[in-house]
Image (tube, coloured by chain):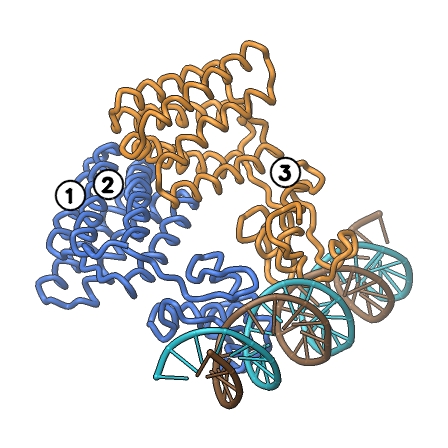
Chain colours: A blue, B orange, C cyan, D brown
Amino acid sequence: MNATSTDRIADAVYERLREEIFTGELAPGARLSVPALAVRLEVSRSPVRDAVLRLVQDRLASEEPRRGAVVARVGARELAAIYDVREVLEGLAARLAVENSGRRLVVALHDALAEHERAVRAGDVAAITAADMRFHALVRQASGNTEVVRLLDDVQTQVRLAMRTTQVTAGPRQSVDDHRAILTAIESGDPAAAELAARAHIHRLRSALLDQAEDGV
Amino acid sequence: MNATSTDRIADAVYERLREEIFTGELAPGARLSVPALAVRLEVSRSPVRDAVLRLVQDRLASEEPRRGAVVARVGARELAAIYDVREVLEGLAARLAVENSGRRLVVALHDALAEHERAVRAGDVAAITAADMRFHALVRQASGNTEVVRLLDDVQTQVRLAMRTTQVTAGPRQSVDDHRAILTAIESGDPAAAELAARAHIHRLRSALLDQAEDGV
DNA sequence: AATCCGATATTTGCATGTAAACTGTGCGGG
DNA sequence: CCCGCACAGTTTACATGCAAATATCGGATT
């Protein structure tokens, strides 16, 4: 009956606020006043409070005690640190994927990669992003390690938020080449090679990122 | 003025419940009834609710909607997955520590290692654990990457909880040797060697862990 | 004109009320 | 003897009240 998944108002509010943060309706730095949000969303303050607490826990918002929460800002410096973490986690996911997974994964990855190439040739930015994310999602799902999946989801959340502040163009052709290298390594069944290829990919993204954002903290 | 850090009741309740979970007063599987806890801790339900929600977010408790929260159980299977993650994160921390840090770190690590060796010779279990944790804490602090620090803190939380369920003896002599190898690599200023040494250490811990827990899920 | 000050409005954090849903229990039917 | 079910107690999730702390804004003073 409900758009999200559970029927708890607090969950719906949480999802709603998340979306508004990602779309920029709630810009980094915006105050998250519980009474004001409750009025706007036409619910009581309780579920809004729960939702805001969760946003803080997710680091989509930051709070100071007694002073309320604001939408978080993720600068280039923080983003670089996140990418250091992402590098080793994506490497782990790729290695585990090789160790745990079979032909199903390879087929799915070929499909995602083909779509990725098509989107790059067409210059379709949305499709590029979607195919890129699908490739990574397939690998981490295949890792069979729920911790890696969860942590990489968190990383992706932070990256999405950072894109509201810092501009991050991925370098689409390089990404396709990197993905192809990862897929080749996975196909060859070599866990160490897959790990290295995945790490190299993220490492290059990190470098591109830092080059673009010369503005410092 | 307060024992914990802030003067919010919700924070105090959170810390209190955390401690009770770690000491085993609240055993894995125990229900976290908000009204019952509120009565026992002599506060109202609101701060207890906030604290329980945070415990769930930390995965010290798990909840099903409309059914309440219980203290989480971390089995051998989950712990192995956590150690996969810990391996790459400790590796990253060691590498970054070499890249960012100077003689201060090396001196402190020598100190921690000496204490570790002394404790092992004396068979002082508490001191062994303390020195072991200090060594790892020094390395991650030195990484200069707040994400790594935070994630490894989370890992440590999960591991502490798991020790309530699964028995985890670290193999004290092996750990001392591993730590010495990590320190040597850090001292030599070789980031890649430090990463490999740290990873090898956690990898061995993981193996020891799985050997001990042949009981499955 | 700029700055300081104080009154007002808003917000946080805690307390408490309540409907609906869930738990468990004992009893009657099969 | 076992199973299902009504019932009573408990719990969750949401709504709302309220004191203390904080931000906001208009006006007076230098």
Q: Label 1 lies in what chain?
A: A
Q: CA distance from mark 2 to mark 3?
A: 36 Å
Residue D16: image x %, image y %? 68, 80
Q: CA distance from mark 3 to mark 1?
A: 45 Å
Horizontally, residue D23 falls left or right of residue B198, namely: right
Horizontally, residue A135 falls left or right of residue B16, namely: left
Q: Which residue is mark 1?
A: A181
Q: Is residue A101 visible?
A: no
Relative depth, front residue between B139 and B107:
B107
Figure quadrant of residue B50? bottom right
Residue B208: image x %, image y %? 47, 22
Q: Is residue A117 visible?
A: yes
Q: CA distance from mark 1 to mark 2?
A: 11 Å
Q: Residues within 10 Å of mark 2 (few under 14, many from 20)?
A: many
Q: Callout 3: helix, strand or loop? A: helix
Q: Residues within 10 Å of mark 3 (few under 14, many from 20)?
A: some
- The residue mark sitting in front, 2 or 3, is 3
Q: Residues within 10 Å of mark 1 (few under 14, many from 20)?
A: some
The numbered disc on residue B22 is 3
